[in-house]
Image: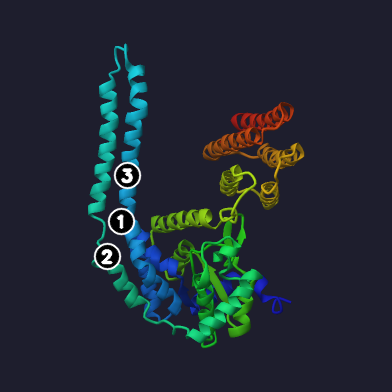
Amino acid sequence: MQKEFKEYYQYSKPQLKKIWNEAIFIFDTNILQGLYRMNKKARNDFLKILKILKKDDRLWTPHQVLKEYHKNRRSVIIGLEKNYQDAINTITSFSTTFSNKFQGKLKTACENHPLLNTDEVYGKVESSLNSITEEITKIKSSHPKWKNSDTILEQIEQIFDNFGEKFSNKELKEVFKEGEKRFKDKIPPGYADDKANGGEKEGEEKFGDLIIWKQILNFSKTIDKPVIFVTDDTKEDWWIIEYEKPFSPRYELKKEIFDIGEIDFEMYTSDNFLKFASIHFKENVGEESIKEIKRMRLLAEERNYLMHKKFKDKKSFRHPFFREFIMRQERLNHRLMYIAEDLKLNKDVMYDIRNHQERLMHFLDMISEEDNFHPAMLEELFHLEDRLQSRLLRYFRSEKISKRATHELFRYLDESIHLYRRLIKYADINPEYYERFHMRMLRNQHDLREYLESSKIE
């Protein structure tokens, strides 16, 4: 049975060890671009592993990856340089706002007080902001001048010199034609980039991931070794997502590459790759490097999350408020899943939480298209939120909760109730319904807060 349904089975530890011993490693465009965003220590640790793979002749790169890297390289560099000025502009804007809006209030608070001096307090605020600006400017002055002398490019040229051929125009047209059908049927990879599926890309650009995949498939026919693909693209058109995290390559991908090349296929994000590579190759890679690379990946995920949510590209909502509400609810969902993971909730609880969240978002999607709110719609919406909070309360009654997790849960509850208060106000339903829904949420919040504050906190 396992042979027939091979793609659905996870590799055992011995199988993974064998794969790591034999595999050819392929790195996505975002990994090459990520080298610019890492701090120096993390970048050197990552390059150290890449050089080991290069020395052992275990690297191969699709032509499309290097094409995308060269095409976008200067944009990445310029973006990093622009971040300094963006930070300075933000501080300047804050300083102006403080001066225009709060200086008068500060003066009122300080006047007729024997120990408070308006000019002295305001001067300290200005001095602090100026000090931060000077520090940013100082850091900017020491930033690598990659536009003029790109040492990362030089290393990439040396390490990734084993790459595939580009597709001919005829081959590209065939990929585009096949891609239209695959994307319509949501066959991975790449369909999440298609604007028709809520992505950001149109025309031929949307097929970038599919071109990379097709070049990998062609390469798989020429080797008799496993392939490990390292990518920080964590969308659902590459990964099986569990508890908001990439868990395994999509089953379709594993099956497609095995059917064509009869080889094993595994995927890693950059931080997990570095973690396992340091163990496998017995290289001393600092834990701080792995954490830094993970931090950069999560920041990229957040950017992708905001860009690729299916609601972002809806042309219109019956109620424009729902754009903001849905995005904020999704962020709350993410936060709750991270809290749940931190608390190491059992699988049944995690399943219930995720199931409630999916039902909640599905219902929001439906009512966002309605011309008029009906109280029954909000009744169902609050019922779903009520069940989610009740499930949490039942679990916490039997568990010890860390102080950090308690703090995060309080934040989650505060933001959640604030968001739903706004929804009630926006819906403008009659006072009877408002009072009932409002009191229900207050009760849930009070019950959970009271229990967290009085329970066994580590």
On the image, the x and y values in percent for residue 58 come to 43, 79
Q: Which of marks 1 and 3 is in front?
A: 3
* Quadrant hosting residue 381: top right
Q: Which of marks 2 and 3 is nearer the N terminus?
A: 3
Mark 3 lies on a secondary structure that is helix
Residue 152, located in which quarter of the rendered image? Answer: bottom left
- As helix, strand or loop, the secondary structure at mark 2 comes to loop
Closer to the chain start, of discs 2 and 1, is 1
Determine contact: label 2, label 1, CB under 8 Å: yes
Work out whether 147 lies above or below 402. Answer: below
Q: Name the residue under label 1.
A: 81
Q: How is the image coloured?
A: rainbow
Side of 319 relative to 216 (left or right)? right
The residue beneath circle 3 is: 89
Q: Quadrant of the C terminus?
A: top right
Is disc 1 surrounded by few (<14), some (14 to 19) or many (20+) residues within 10 Å? some
Three-letter code, disc 3: Asn
Amino acid at dot 2: Lys
Report x, y in % for residue 309: 57, 55
Label at residue 341: none
Instruction: Name the residue that disc number 2 marks.
Output: 147
Would residue 96 be seen by someone viewing this image from the given angle?
yes
Q: Are marks 1 and 3 in contact (CB under 8 Å)?
A: no
Q: From mark 1 to mark 3, how far is it between C-alphas?
A: 13 Å
- Where residue 218 appears, as percent x and y from the top left, is 53, 84
Circles 2 and 3, Cβ within 8 Å, touching? The answer is no
Please tell me which residue is depicted at 27% across the width and 64% down the height of the picture.
146
Vertical position of residue 92 compared to residue 113: above or below: below
